[in-house]
Image: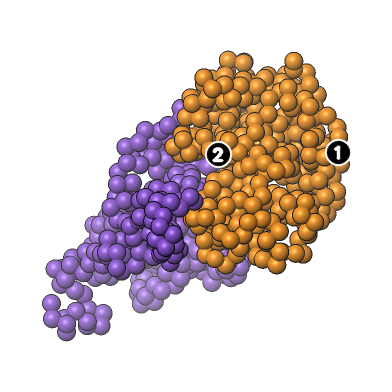
Chain colours: A purple, B orange
Amino acid sequence: MARSSLFRVLRPLSPRAKLVIGILSFVLPVGLWSLVSYVPVVWHPQIMITDPGSVSYLDDGAHLARDAYDSEVAAAKQEGRAAPKGVPANPIYLPSPGEVLRAFYTSFTTPPETKDGQWLHQSLWHSVRIIFWGYVISSLIGVPLGILCGAYAAMARVNEPFIEFFRYLPAPAFGALMVAILGIYDGPKIAIIVIGTFFQQVLIIANTTRKLDPALLEAALTLGTRSRQLLTRVVVPAILPDLYRDQRILLGWAWTYLIVAELIGTTSGITWFITQQARYQHFPNVYAAIAMIGILGLGTDMLLALLGRHLFPWDRSLAKFA
Amino acid sequence: MVRRAAVGAVLAWMAAQAVGAAPAPLRLGYSDWPGWVAWQIAIDKGWLTQAGLDVKFEWFDYSASMEAFAAGKIDGDCVTNGDALVMGAGGARNVMIMLTDYSNGNDMIVARPGINSLKDLKGKKIGIEIGLVEHLLLLDGLKKQGMTQDDVTLVNSKTNETPQVLASGQVDAIGAWQPNSGLAMKALPGAHPVYTSAQSPGLIYDVLTVNPASIAAHRADYIKLIKVWDHVVSYISDPKTQDDAVQIMAARVGLAAPKYQQLLAGTHLISIAEAQKIFVKADGLGSLYGSTQIADGFNVRNAVYKQPQKIDGYIEPALSAMLP
């Protein structure tokens, strides 16, 4: 892996380099995180008290800023009292990778504590269902509309100015309205995902359609294709691989609306877990839950990418960087 | 063909959702506050069913519960008396039919070390969510010291961020309720309360407030519900059953039982007998009428809404009065 072979403009990497660098992209941030967590000299701006000594307001496990700790120790020594003891620590909002990993495991193995409670995997599954339906409903309308807008200038002119306007309205702002219309359960949550995804979807897919190679259209017209056939036999098949990739990106988009969507109406899904744990500052659990969403999202995307390569073996751009 | 089937499936599913959401006769909202989490005991023990009630308690984020009530999607909601007015002023008619508790120390003004009283806060910065109950609490405390809001600088801060705000050192005190107030003291050791709701009990009453149409239709059910509440209060107060009660409540919010015990200590739960006294019309914080009047004045002054509300229309003591 000489440097020259790594940095060539728009050239694919060798399979080995791809694998190594791909792994590095996770190892580097986690390594940095471990360094900050496990090597006290790097940061550790606080002291976690292990023995409060004679200081009345401290107790075991309390976090104290380093200078405040130092002055308490100095004061205690000067007056001949028992000095507090402690170990360097990071603020509680930055737990170590080990703590998060443990939280990841225990949060799945802890049974629900209330009678109507849910296991974590049930909550996660609930969230996945919300995303799925939001995405499906948005796609059922958004994909055909996007293709029509891309293919016919008149359709684009009718729809796009309004959609351009609407896509800037923040989806969460529709929360109260959606509750009023769709009730307090899953309806308004799905609606927020749809609002967050749909408008971008139409524009992105319209754009993809417009990028179609005009040579294909000309060839088809020369061969006597009629207008409607042009759409179904030429345009749609030609853009399918790009459409598929757009849909993958849009699925990620839908996921980003999950947390705001699930805060609307009755609290449910993975959001219930995250907000509740954050409220009581159980940060390892919060990070673990965020990681779960990341893993689910990335996992789905990798599966879809793999599927894409089988569906569209002729599409070079999929193989190049994926 | 396939697509039509898919559309059909989606529509059928949405219809099923709509039917699934069809009423259990009573749907009530509750959220993370000890006086409301207490309902979990009645739910887990099956007391609601035993009383012949078909009530479904829905767990919300506090502000989401008010949205759902305002949209007419639930029959009743657990809120503070001040927020009952806010919902009503916004068009969601509601009537407070029972008291769950008043805050007895859980709401606090927490100051950094070195500031020992509200008086010391003169000219200092206080992080507080403007227009919310802690703001009211602060004004009440300042008034007792002969001070006003002009003597301090308010920094508008989200209540759940106040622990970090105080720890950052950019303010000298914050106002928050539990668990945020406790977390603020943990985040900045030596920080301590200089004024709490225990010093003005009744400034903030927590209530179950209900859509008037629902009262008309389910009057008998609500009376049964209030009776169940009395059972909950005695189950929590009784030393013999308290541990079990705290266990259930702690589980609901995902906290260890001993920690929850502390939160409970700052909440004074209200039995039927006590509620009947608070439901008597009078000035001052000992009466729900007096307390709500003060909250109304505060809301109007802080432009939460414009028109002062007619307090009497918001309070319905008759249901609690029916019980022995």
The first of marks 2 and 1 along the sequence is: 2
Q: Residue at x 68, y 29 (%)?
A: B270
Q: CA distance from mark 2 to mark 1?
A: 29 Å
User: Picture coordinates of residue A283 (x, y %)?
Assistant: 41, 52
- Observer able to see residue A151: no
Q: Which mark is residue B222?
A: none
User: Picture coordinates of residue A156 (x, y %)?
Assistant: 55, 69
**Chain of the residue on which disc 1 is drawn:** B
User: Split into 4 quadrants, where in the image is the N terminus of chain B?
Assistant: top left
Tag count: 2
Q: Residue at x 29, y 68 (%)?
A: A41
Binning the other alpha carbons within 10 Å of mark 1 as few (below 14), some (14 to 19) or many (20 upward) gives: some
What residue did someone put label 2 on? B263
Q: Which amino acid type corresponds to the residue marked 2 in the rendered image?
A: Leu
Q: Residue at x 39, y 53 (%)?
A: A82
What residue did someone put label 1 on? B283
Binning the other alpha carbons within 10 Å of mark 2 as few (below 14), some (14 to 19) or many (20 upward) gives: some
Is the Cβ of the residue at disc 2 closer than 8 Å to that at disc 1? Answer: no
Q: Is residue B250 left or right of residue A246?
A: right
Q: Residue at x 62, y 59 (%)?
A: B115
Q: Nearer the viewer, residue B20 or B12?
A: B20
Identify the element where label 1 is drawn. Answer: loop
- Dividing the picture into quadrants, the one containing residue A27 is bottom left
Above or below, comparing residue B320 to residue A70 in the picture? above
User: Picture coordinates of residue B223 (x, y %)?
Assistant: 71, 20
Q: Is residue B182 left or right of residue A301?
A: right
- Observer able to see residue B238: yes
